[in-house]
Amino acid sequence: MKKITVMLLGIALLASCGKKQQTLPDADNSHAVITVKTQRAQLSTTYPATLKGIQDVEIRPKVSGFITRIYVQEGQSVSRGQVLFTIDSETFRAQVNAANEAVKAAQQQINVVRSNIATAELTLENKKMLFERQIISEYEYKASENQVASLKAQLGAAQAQLGQARAQLASARDNLSFCTVTSPTSGVIGMLPHKVGALVGPSMQQAFTTVSDIATVYAYFSMTEKRLLELARTANGGVQEAIRTMPGVKLQLADGTIYGEEGRIDAVGGVIDPNTGSVQMRASFPNAHRILHSGGSANIQFPVFASDAILVPQSATTEIQDKKFVYVVGADNKVKSTEITVEAQSDGSNYVVTSGLRPGDRIVVEGVQNLKNGQEIKPITPEQAKKMREQAAKDVKEGKLPI
């Protein structure tokens, strides 16, 4: 029995020695630590936004007819006045010809009446002379006067008829010109649901297409009344002064990427929505490469500035049940898990602490997931920690440390 016990003890010792030779030396318990202080911080608030072009113009024909030709394609860029499509014009061309004939007839009628008036007036002058010499009766003279008056009335009617004929001609010419539909603005052609041969008209429910002017795109979003008041007070000159001095805003697209051009806030609504307590705002973004499209959705990243703010890296925090904690290093180099509250806005890498820390506190910024409350550490600077990591990586590469 003794021999068996001694043998087992020997095997255990050998195993222990072999295990020690394969294990890395214990870490020196070094952790990167910073001392928090107050500073000016630039953060950002995100607001959901709807994108719209400078204008989205629905194209609807002014006359009814069958489409004879379409000159553009969906998504094509067009300029103002460019022909989009044409409508069968035979009926309207015939109306123009008929109106032309009516104008000519009315003009001829006027010429005839004017000639008759000239003859009647000459006859009236002769009869007046005869009447004064008592050669003809007053009745015959008055009859000649009445004839001149009647002819002048006919002239007025003929002139009115000419005016009406000219109006009909102008209307017919307009209708004929409406058979060629042009773009009222520069922009991008939308979908083309109607094809050649389709019957279209002014009362059609679905527009022929839409031309969107998206050289500049507006992003519409809502800001709370409280935030708007903060802006006005900070600028010390009202909302308009705040907008004038405000730096550019960024646009986060639907795929999460940031749009390459900065925008400017250029309009603020004058009425606060009583249901939401917010006011609508507008930011404009240049869109030379047609990346943004009217009707799209995005997020406005609105800059927010905080003075005398305590910033902590987000990597220095842990989260438990929606509460954030940091490890504060005491005078004895022991760490203590401390709850902090932070601003809703952040710059993506740092939090602004509103409570839980004071200037001068030391916190651990790396490896916090491996710490325990009350654990003693060896504080080093982030720069020293970086050098240690680089040296360790070099040692592994050179084979001085196992991988």
Image (cartoon, rainbow, N blue to C red):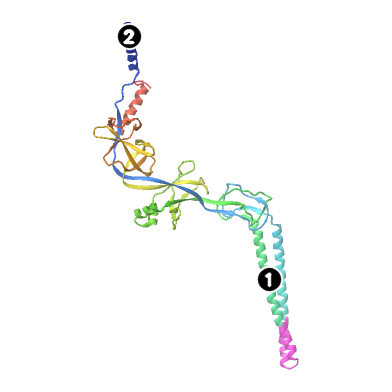
The C terminus: image quadrant:
top left
Q: Where is residue 320 in the image (x, y as percent from the top left)?
A: 37, 36
Quarter of image, res 325: top left
Crowding at mark 2 (Cα within 10 Å: few <14, some 14-19, many 20+):
few
The amino acid beneath tag 2 is: Thr
Task: Give whichever of discs 2 and 1 has the lower sequence position.
Answer: 2
106 or 397: nearer the eye?
397
208 or 335: nearer the eye?
335
Q: Is residue 193 shown left or right of residue 385? A: right
Q: Where is residue 113 in the image (x, y as percent from the top left)?
A: 72, 76
Residue 140 colored in magenta in the image = yes
Q: Position of residue 50 (x, y in %)?
A: 49, 49
Farthest residue in the front direction? 1
Residue 364 colored in magenta in the image = no
Residue 111 sits above or below residue 21 on the image: below
Residue 195 sits above or below residue 131 on the image: above
The amino acid beneath tag 1 is: Leu
Identify the residue at image location x=73%, y=83%.
Answer: 147
Tag of residue 162: 1
Quarter of image, res 364: top left
Tag of residue 313: none
Q: Name the residue under label 2.
A: 5
Q: Please provide the residue range marked out in magenta.
A: 119-147
- Total numbered labels placed on residues in the image: 2
Per the image, label 2 sits on a secondary structure element best described as helix
Q: Where is residue 283 in the image (x, y as percent from the top left)?
A: 45, 51
